[in-house]
């Protein structure tokens, strides 16, 4: 498989504080100086009982997210990458997201962020299973293609390894509107993903417990990437073609 050299700067969109390293450690190791944008890295100013408080031991939401941000900073430093944290709220805090449809909020925020960072390459999740991942995937794919930058999808790990049917369904839905080519990135780069993931101390055991076999495979690699280009319009399609590939659900 072709091992693609990514135009820089490389921006990896990570729904949560750990997804980029779980899913793209080899790509990050192959492109030092990459920027990892974590989309749902914010917290409402409340005491809360949910996933983030359970895993971090902090009930005050900003404290819980501060724990997770510290972990992210350390793990990314080990890869020579730098974090950008967006203050959007993950699904744990969904009831505090406000009145506006969050799809609009995410799309507008990502548009501003990408315009500021001016990436040469955007890596974004295939968008499996978790609502937050789907939200980032659908918004970011349209934006990255509209910007005309190198656009690469990554397999959401570890869940992508546990849900092969869902991966196929998503790829099939996407390939109706885009050209997808599976590529290798950083395949020859030596990465100790288990050591990197142990920096995410609050998440390591919880993630492993959720998908034990897939997690073990993920620690050994398990990464997959697809280069995305627009499908050129042909014949009658050309007349009605829209410039935006739009949300592509599975
Ligand atoms: Zn995630």
Image: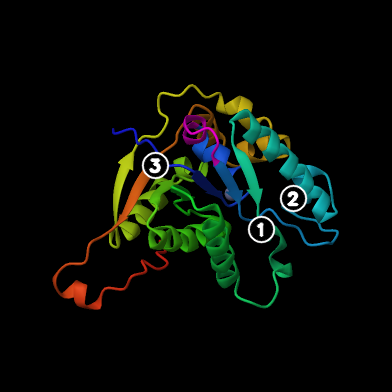
Q: What residue is shown with label 3? A: 225
Residue drawn at x 54%, y 39% as measured from the top left = 34
Asked if residue 106 is among those painted magenta in the image, a careful observer would answer no
- Residue 224 in view here: yes
Left or right: 13 in relation to 227: right
Q: In the image shown, does 80 or 157 lie closer to the viewer?
A: 80
Badge 1 is on which residue? 90
**Camera-side residue of 45 and 173:** 45
Mark 1 Cα shell of 10 Å, populated few (<14), some (14-19), many (≥20): many
Where, quadrant-wise, is the C terminus in this rendering?
bottom left
**Which image quarter: residue 102?**
bottom right
Q: Would you say residue 17 is visible in this rendering?
A: no
Q: Disc 1 vs disc 2: Cβ atoms closer than 8 Å?
A: yes
Identify the image quadrant of the N terminus.
Answer: top left
Q: Which residues are magenta?
A: 26-34
Residue 32: x and y in percent read: 53, 32
Q: CA distance from mark 1 to mark 2?
A: 10 Å
Q: Is residue 78 left or right of residue 145?
A: right
On screen, residue 51 versus residue 103, left or right, reads: right
């Amino acid at each position: 498989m072709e091992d693609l050299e990514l135009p820089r700067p490389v921006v990896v969109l990570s729904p949560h504080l750990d997804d980029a390293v779980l899913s793209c450690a080899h790509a990050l190791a192959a492109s030092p100086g990459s920027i990892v944008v974590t989309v749902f890295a914010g917290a409402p100013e409340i005491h809360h009982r949910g996933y983030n408080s359970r895993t971090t031991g902090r009930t005050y939401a900003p404290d819980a997210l501060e724990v997770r941000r510290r972990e992210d900073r350390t793990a990314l430093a080990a890869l020579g990458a730098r974090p950008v944290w967006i203050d959007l709220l993950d699904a744990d805090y969904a009831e505090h997201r406000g009145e506006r449809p969050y799809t609009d909020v995410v799309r507008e925020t990502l548009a501003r962020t990408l315009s500021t960072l001016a990436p040469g390459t955007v890596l974004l999740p295939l968008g499996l299973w978790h609502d937050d991942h789907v939200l980032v995937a659908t918004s970011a794919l349209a934006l990255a293609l509209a910007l005309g930058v190198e656009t690469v999808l990554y397999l959401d790990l570890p869940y992508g390894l546990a849900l092969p049917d869902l991966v196929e369904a998503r790829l099939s839905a996407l390939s109706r509107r885009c050209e997808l080519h599976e590529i290798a990135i950083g395949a020859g780069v030596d990465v100790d993903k288990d050591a990197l993931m142990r920096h995410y101390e609050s998440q390591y055991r919880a993630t492993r417990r959720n998908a034990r076999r897939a997690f073990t495979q993920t620690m050994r690699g398990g990464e997959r990437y697809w280069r995305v280009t627009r499908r050129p319009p042909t014949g009658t399609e050309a007349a009605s073609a829209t410039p935006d590939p739009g949300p592509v659900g599975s």
